[in-house]
Image (cartoon, grey):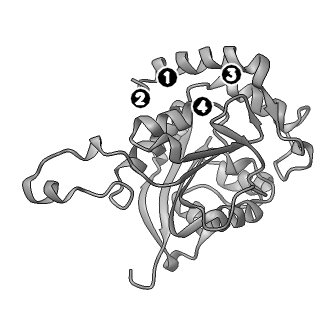
Amino acid sequence: MLKVDSIREKLILRRMNLLIPTKFRSYKDSLQTDMIDIPGKDVVSYSLEGVFNDPGSARSSRLIKPLSCIERIRPLLLNNRTNGVLQDLDIEIDVKLLCIGPRTEAEPLLLWSYGFRLESITCIDLLSYSPLIDLGDMHQMPYSDNSFDVVFCSCTLVYSKNIPKAIAEFKRVAKKQAIFALMFDIPNEEYRDIGPLTTGSVIFSPEDIVNLFFPSDACEILYRQFDLRNLRLLNGSSSVVIFKERSLHD
């Protein structure tokens, strides 16, 4: 039922109203982070607005759904290969996943609903009201090297004013051959020109995102989605990509 946006949003709002008055915390060094400057607001205040504007994180399902289907994450059972028995969705995905910038509990719960083991999901954000979300900065995360099989980041990296530093952290905590899953909202066709003015990097197509991490010949794209036609609509489009570094044996 958590896959249904309206149901998930009601649950998240109920838990927010219950927990925020007594459990809300913000990252102690939030004013010294490498997050972009929001006119008239500090980054925590801006993030808190986002908590209430989109408590159910409906857009993140565009990234979570394809991620849950990748065979390297959810291997097919041997008997399914031989007998065609569709039992894979009953098997929990037991990989260590890092979720960066979820704001609310919606993303970890949505990941759980798509089969990821809740105990193996680690979340980090500049603010938290939940035991599911650690406090921290994506530019200097409190995790050991080579810790995660999957690094998941939906519409958060774009708020960095030091994207190379953030990506270096993403790669530091990722295991060798880890999968990276990222999404950016692209408001309109002009973003390719104005984006670098705020982020310092061209982030438009899925390939633009991948090129921030690895050279094109050193990377394997497992899934991409980017509809140029939607850039002419009011809500714009999303640039979605799931990828990993190529191994010497690929």
Residue 105, disc: 4
Residue type marked 2: Lys
For disc 2, the marked residue is 3
Which residue occupies 51% across, 65% down? 178
Q: Residues within 10 Å of mark 4 (few under 14, many from 20)?
A: many
Mark 1 in CB contact with mark 2 (< 8 angstroms): yes
**Figure quadrant of the C terminus:** bottom left
For disc 3, the marked residue is 52
Q: Is residue 200 left or right of residue 144?
A: right
Dot 2 or dot 4: first in sequence order is 2
Q: Residues within 10 Å of mark 1 (few under 14, many from 20)?
A: many
Q: How far apart are marks 3 and 2 (CA)?
A: 19 Å
Q: Distance between the residues labelled 3 and 4?
A: 12 Å
Q: Distance between the residues labelled 1 and 4?
A: 10 Å
Image x and y of residue 76, in percent: 25, 56
Residue type marked 4: Glu
Image x and y of residue 117, in percent: 45, 43
Residue type marked 1: Arg
For disc 1, the marked residue is 8
Q: How far apart are marks 1 and 2 (CA)?
A: 7 Å
Dot 3 or dot 2: first in sequence order is 2
